[in-house]
């Protein structure tokens, strides 16, 4: 499974693209507030260079004060001395007073594999955009996050082939009183995904996440251990949906869920891309008759080399 197509919709808005080849004089640009805007900071499709001038051209051509949804696309390799995408964005924060949703890294396989996407410390985004309600990040190389408090953030997602433990610990130490939706693609240790169940403990306690209603701990090679921790986690009683999809869940993890706290209050439980036997998958469905249980994309339970859905 790979990510091979750009976003066409973000936060309920269709996506419009502005890149180095967009000519504001000839392009028919829609009203700023009617689109989620993808801005590619690279100076060409395969150009390996961060080009901050693209954002300057965008804010000169579009009424950025009305932009509510912004997507940062391909930015190439950050050479020594180049500004990071976050530095480019925060320097222009006063031009985006209405920004509510940000996707950092809409980069597809043909541009850069997910585990090769160079990220950076995203902590400054929260101070620069205090009205941010949605933040989604793809890629985890050099990714950083220090503990912050974000009063208005409702949706937070990290897509990666390997989410470092220090990032998971940073997320767990943040205060997100309004957060309703949290997704973490934890990935594999081969690609930097060295987070442990202990790193997830503050999230599973729910102490800093009083509003959380959806939790996704996904794409993990330690999915069985995560399932065991989730089975006794205090936060689960408050959830409406739970996803342990895309990973290497086996019958062992499923047994933890079956013998743990009740899950009958959930509206949905996503366990797709798993290594459970068909009999165990059937038992889960039977045990949760009122829950939408997704056990699709089952892999060979006898596979000696189980793999997560997205890694490289």
Image (tube, rainbow, N blue to C red):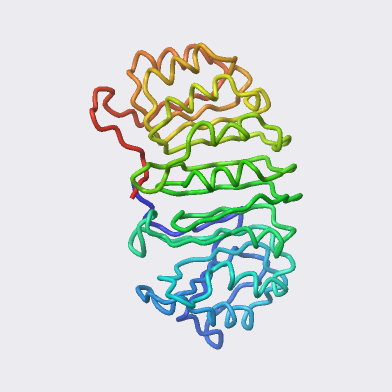
Which residue does the image show at 62% across and 35% down from the upper left? 203
Left or right: 151 as drawn, with respect to 12 = right
Query: Quarter of the image holding residue 108?
Result: bottom left
Q: Residue 209: percent from the left, percent from the top?
A: 69, 37
Q: Nearer the viewer, residue 303 or 20?
A: 303
Query: Quarter of the image holding residue 248?
Result: top left
Q: Residue 254: percent from the left, percent from the top?
A: 43, 19
Which quarter shows the N terminus?
top left
Question: Quick check: 276 above or below 155?
Answer: above
Q: Residue 5: percent from the left, percent from the top?
A: 40, 57
Q: Nearer the viewer, residue 250 or 61?
A: 250
Left or right: 248 as drawn, with respect to 88 = left
Q: Residue 130: percent from the left, percent from the top?
A: 74, 59
Query: How many labels, in total?
Result: 0
Which residue does the image show at 23% across and 28% down from the upper left? 304
Which residue does the image show at 63% across and 83% down from the upper left? 60
Q: Nearer the viewer, residue 38 or 228?
A: 228
Give the residue at the far bottom of this rendering: 25
Which residue does the image show at 71% across and 33% down from the upper left? 207
């Amino acid at each position: 499974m790979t990510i091979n197509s750009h976003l066409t919709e973000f936060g309920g808005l269709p996506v419009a693209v502005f890149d180095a080849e967009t000519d504001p004089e000839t392009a028919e640009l829609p009203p700023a507030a009617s689109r989620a805007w993808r801005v590619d900071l690279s100076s060409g499709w395969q150009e390996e260079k961060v080009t901050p001038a693209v954002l300057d051209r965008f804010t000169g051509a579009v009424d950025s004060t009305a932009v509510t949804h912004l997507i940062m696309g391909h930015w190439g390799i950050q050479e020594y001395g180049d500004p990071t995408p976050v530095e480019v964005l925060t320097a222009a924060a006063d031009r985006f007073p209405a920004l509510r949703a940000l996707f950092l890294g809409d980069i597809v396989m043909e541009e850069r594999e997910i585990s090769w996407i160079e990220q950076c410390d995203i902590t400054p985004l929260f101070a620069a955009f205090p009205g941010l309600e949605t933040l989604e990040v793809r890629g985890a190389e050099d990714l950083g996050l220090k503990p912050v408090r974000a009063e208005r953030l409702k949706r937070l997602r990290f897509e990666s082939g390997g989410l470092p433990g220090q990032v998971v610990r940073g997320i767990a130490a943040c205060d997100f009183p309004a957060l309703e939706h949290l997704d973490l693609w934890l990935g594999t240790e081969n690609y930097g995904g060295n987070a442990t169940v202990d790193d997830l403990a503050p999230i599973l306690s729910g102490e800093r996440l009083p509003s959380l209603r959806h939790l996704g701990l996904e794409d993990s090679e330690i999915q069985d251990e995560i399932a065991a921790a989730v089975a006794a986690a205090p936060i689960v009683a408050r959830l409406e949906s739970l996803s342990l999809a895309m990973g290497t869940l086996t019958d062992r993890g499923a047994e933890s869920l079956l013998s743990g706290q009740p899950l009958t209050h959930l509206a949905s439980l996503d366990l797709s891309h798993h290594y459970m036997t068909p009999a165990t998958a059937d038992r889960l469905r039977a045990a949760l008759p009122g829950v939408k249980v997704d056990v699709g994309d089952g892999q060979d339970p006898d596979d000696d080399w189980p793999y997560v859905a997205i890694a490289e």
